[in-house]
């Protein structure tokens, strides 16, 4: 008969001696204290693992949503900074420098003959794969827009045709209004209740671009706000420019009413 060796460890409940390595009391069946602690540690470890797994699932969901939204977000961010950069380059770059063909470097992909003509209403100007025709220039008051005493909103209807054989995009950031050299503020179109907004005209805001298929013609609606304290209403102009063209990268329309 094998004798059971006891080390002096006793059950905390009934006081019975417990053999080394035994996890429960042979008399009352209670788990020993060390075993209880071990069980608690195992339980805590299980909870930690479960929480970590849950956070991992949440993180994967966040990554999935971000991956799905990233292209659209990146496009908006790119358009935002591009429109600001375009405006800076227009004022400080190629327009005033009159870069000659062959000297433009990699930035300019094409050559566009200089054109200083100031086109009037119903006159058509050709630029690259675009044909532009100024259809109408109206004060915002004709559409119920109320301006401050020192401001005037002007609504422009510009017909754009894709004369090329590939899809092209007309960008709002490339259409800039001036009054004697001063920028007008590009306003988001807010005349949705007007007759033009209900017809074929499509509002084109500064941070937007419109796709045109080969041969497609579209009238776009542009809205600008001029400061009456600056510039001359008789010298108001609409400029379309494209920095990828050498020489004089613009077309000019008169907005004088």
Image (spheres, helix red, strand yellow):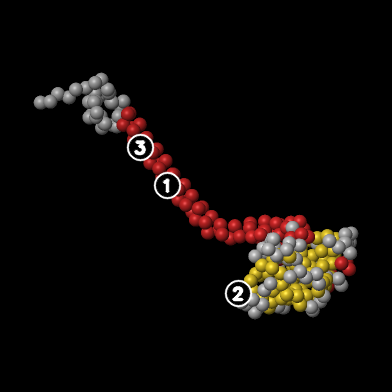
Q: Residue at x 81, y 76 (%)?
A: 121
Q: Are marks 1 and 3 in contact (CB under 8 Å)?
A: no
Q: Residue at x 69, y 68 (%)?
A: 111
Give the camera-side residue of 187 and 236: 236
x%, y% of residue 151? 86, 62
Q: Is residue 94 above or below residue 44?
A: below
Rounded to the nearest whole Å, what is the CA distance between mark 3 and mark 2? 67 Å
Q: Residue at x 45, y 51 (%)?
A: 57
Task: Give the class, few, some or many, for how many residues have Cα within 10 Å of label 1's Cα (few <14, many ≥20).
Answer: few
Residue that label 2 marks: 166
Residue that label 3 marks: 42
Task: Give the class, few, some or many, for how many residues have Cα within 10 Å of label 3's Cα (few <14, many ≥20).
Answer: few
Q: Secondary structure at mark 3?
A: helix
Task: Give the class, few, some or many, for how many residues have Cα within 10 Å of label 2's Cα (few <14, many ≥20).
Answer: few
Q: Residue at x 74, y 70 (%)?
A: 113
Rounded to the nearest whole Å, what is the CA distance between mark 1 and mark 3? 16 Å
Rounded to the nearest whole Å, what is the CA distance between mark 2 and mark 1? 51 Å
Q: Secondary structure at mark 2?
A: loop
x%, y% of residue 213? 62, 76
Q: Nearer the viewer, mark 1 or mark 3?
A: 1
Q: Nearer the viewer, mark 2 or mark 1?
A: 2
x%, y% of residue 79? 65, 60
Q: Which quadrant holds the C terminus?
A: bottom right
Residue 241, located in which quarter of the rendered image?
Answer: bottom right
Q: Is residue 113 visible?
A: yes
x%, y% of residue 61? 49, 54
Query: Residue 69 bears which disc, if any?
Result: none
Q: Nearer the viewer, mark 3 or mark 2?
A: 2
Q: Is residue 237 above or below residue 32?
A: below
Pick whichever of labels 3 and 2 is earlier in the sequence.
Answer: 3
Residue lying farthest to the left in this orientation: 1
Query: Residue 53 bears which disc, if any?
Result: 1
């Amino acid at each position: 008969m094998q004798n059971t060796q006891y080390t002096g460890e006793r059950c905390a409940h009934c006081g019975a001696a417990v053999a080394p390595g035994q996890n429960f009391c042979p008399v009352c069946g209670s788990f020993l204290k060390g075993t209880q602690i071990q069980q608690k540690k195992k339980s805590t470890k299980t909870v930690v693992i479960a929480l970590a797994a849950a956070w991992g699932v949440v993180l994967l969901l966040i990554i999935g949503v971000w991956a799905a939204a990233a292209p659209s977000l990146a496009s908006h961010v790119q358009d935002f900074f591009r429109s600001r950069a375009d405006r800076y380059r227009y004022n400080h770059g190629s327009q005033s420098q009159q870069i000659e063909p062959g000297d433009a470097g990699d930035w300019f992909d094409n050559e566009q003959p200089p054109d200083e003509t100031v086109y009037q209403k119903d006159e058509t100007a050709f630029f690259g794969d675009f044909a532009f025709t100024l259809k109408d220039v109206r004060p915002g008051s004709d559409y119920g827009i109320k301006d401050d005493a020192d401001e005037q909103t002007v609504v422009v209807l510009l017909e754009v045709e894709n004369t090329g054989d590939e899809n092209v995009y007309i960008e709002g950031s490339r259409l800039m209004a001036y009054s004697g050299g001063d920028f007008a503020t590009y306003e988001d179109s807010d005349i949705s209740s007007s007759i033009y907004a209900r017809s074929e005209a499509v509002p084109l805001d500064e941070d937007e671009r419109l796709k045109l298929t080969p041969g497609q013609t579209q009238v776009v609606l542009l809205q600008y706000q001029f400061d009456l304290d600056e510039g001359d209403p008789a010298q108001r102009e609409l400029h379309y420019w494209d920095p990828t063209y050498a020489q004089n990268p613009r077309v000019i329309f008169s907005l004088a009413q």
